Image: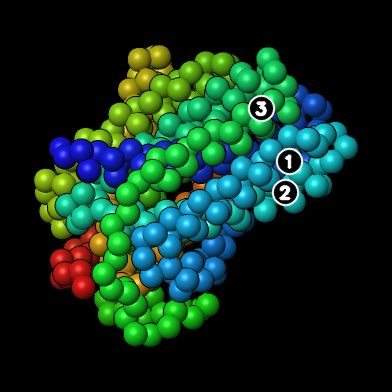
Amino acid sequence: MKKNELNKYGTLLSLYLAQSIPMSFFSTVIPVIMRMENYSLESIGYIQLIKLPWILKLLWAPLVDFTSKTKAQYRRWILASEVFYAMVIVSIGSLNLATDFITIIILMVIAFTASATQDIATDAFAILVLKKEERSLGNSMQSAGSFIGTMLGSGVLLIIYHYWGWQMLLHSLGAFVLLALIPVTLYKVRKDKETRSTGKKVSPLDFAYFFKQKKIGGHVLLLFLFYSGIIGILTMVKPYFVDLGYDVKKIGLISGIFGTACGVAMTIPAGMFLRRRGIVRSVWYFPVLNLLVAVYFFGLTFTNHQLILIYIGVALLWGAYAMASVFVYTMSMQVVRKGREGTDFTIQIVITHLSSLVIAIMSGKIADAIGYRGLFGIEIALSVILLLLLPFIFNVSFYEREEE
């Protein structure tokens, strides 16, 4: 592997880490801290508002594309967004959870708006700097950054809070975000010889035109269903372990550390596999793997839940999720329109987020109504439905089209 290629991967890993660690911290650790400070569950529920910018970001993604015709211009968006992001995080550290709760929530939403903007620009930057054959491993970095960020954001930062307190924690988080910008700041961007514009201005509602492409319907349905066989399991696996009698510390070790580590470990093999076989020849493997995970957990409900079986299930679950993520990211990069890289990639990932949200909400209701075994059985059915639909919704020519 060439030095320039390694430099690209390292730069992208640092950028995805910069956004994933604070995201993990604010969405998983802050609720723990609030509960320790005796906040009501209703107040803790408001924390989920910080995720709104990551759903709504498709609304301003066209603006980022419209103002960025070169890789250097996308990098300016990345740097400006992340510096602002770090400043807001540090400012939150000067506030008190007990007396400034509403202000903190508002600042978190502002911070995550900046982070979502950075994500739009980073995805577009990645599409432009990575050659077609490099995208699978480049997306391994995106997936790995997400999993490593989850591990550090929900583990290491909680330890910092325990020993050094709220202010030091937020200052450390802001400092990390700034340090993560060093690789992209030093990255040498070759000057683009020509504009990437297709001659048509990008409008604020340009995301809507993404859905007017020929044969796009099957692709959208594929994105919506791709995680359907495992998202319900991912959502309910921790409550499942609670009901099996495991304490919080044990669940954190099994799912939070071991499971996430398995996810990180499988990102590179997934990228190498995709690089060797390509999107079209790989599309069947990942839904089949998701089906096997659902079958395993369904079978697990008929056992005495030995610890080794739990660990195997968690390894399969997080490994399959990581590999599916690499595939989805790589496939999504394949179909972006020229000059609208940030917009189109954002749209596709938001589709997967929305479908995951729907399935996650329904999984709790299903598990309540018919138990975990029933939930896992439905996940098997969803996996089978995707496999049956795949020949009809996966149009080979749509993914084999040459980049302009």
C-beta proximity under 8 Å, tags 1 and 2: yes
Sequence-first disc among 3 and 2 = 2
Which of the numbered marks, if any, corresponds to residue 91?
Answer: 1
x, y (%) of residue 211?
39, 76
Spatial CA span between label 1 and label 2: 9 Å
The amino acid type found where label 1 is placed reads Ser
Q: On the image, numbered disc 2 is attached to which residue? A: 107
Which of the numbered marks, if any, corresponds to residue 174?
Answer: none
In the figure, is residue 359 to the left or right of 193? right
Residue 268 in which image quadrant:
top left
Give the camera-side residue of 345 and 283.
345
x, y (%) of residue 312?
33, 22
Number of callouts in the render? 3
Spatial CA span between label 3 and label 1: 12 Å
x, y (%) of residue 152?
50, 27
Disc 1 crowd rating (10 Å Cα; few below 14, some 14-19, many 20+) is some
Q: On the image, numbered disc 3 is attached to which residue? A: 169
Spatial CA span between label 3 and label 2: 16 Å
x, y (%) of residue 383?
31, 49
